[in-house]
Image (cartoon, grey):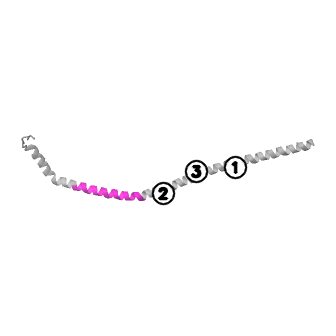
Amino acid sequence: MSAQNSAGIQTLLDAEREASKIIQKAREYRTKRIKEARDEAKKEINDYKTQKEDEFKKFEAEHSKGNKAAEDEASKDAEKQIAEIQAAGKKKQSEVVDNLLKAVFEVKPVAPTSA
């Protein structure tokens, strides 16, 4: 009976060791699978982020074209007005200088009036 008990105990110990090995392998597999899932999630997040950034750049490029055209048109208008002002200044330059010199050299005193 003692040999039978000893054999039964040995069988139980062997089964426990085998179960421990199976549990250890399962833990390693789970850890490995979690790491793989985390890496896959990071890759998907980066891909999604890249896709959304590309969409935003495309959207921005499409909508900034209208702004660029408006800026160009405003710039052309401003340059045209500046050219007109400069032409008017050159045209009236001698007259303005003459008026300034006349005002400085031809003093006409005026008596103050009391109010």
Residue, disc 1: 29
Residue, disc 3: 42
Q: Amino acid at mark 3?
A: Lys
Crowd tier of the residue under label 2, counting other residues whose Cα lies within 10 Å: few below 14, some 14–19, many 20 or above: few
Q: Amino acid at mark 2?
A: Glu
In primary-sequence order, the first of circles 1 and 3 is 1
Q: CA distance from mark 2 to mark 1?
A: 39 Å
Residue 55 marker: 2
Residue at horizontal 61%, vertical 50%?
Answer: 39
Task: Say how many tags the image has.
Answer: 3
Q: Is 68 covered by the magenta stretch?
A: yes
Residue at horizontal 33%, vertical 57%?
Answer: 72
Depicted 97 relative to depicted 68: above or below: above
- Secondary structure of the residue carrying numbered label 2: helix
Depicted 46 relative to depicted 110: above or below: below
Residue at horizontal 16%, vertical 55%?
Answer: 91
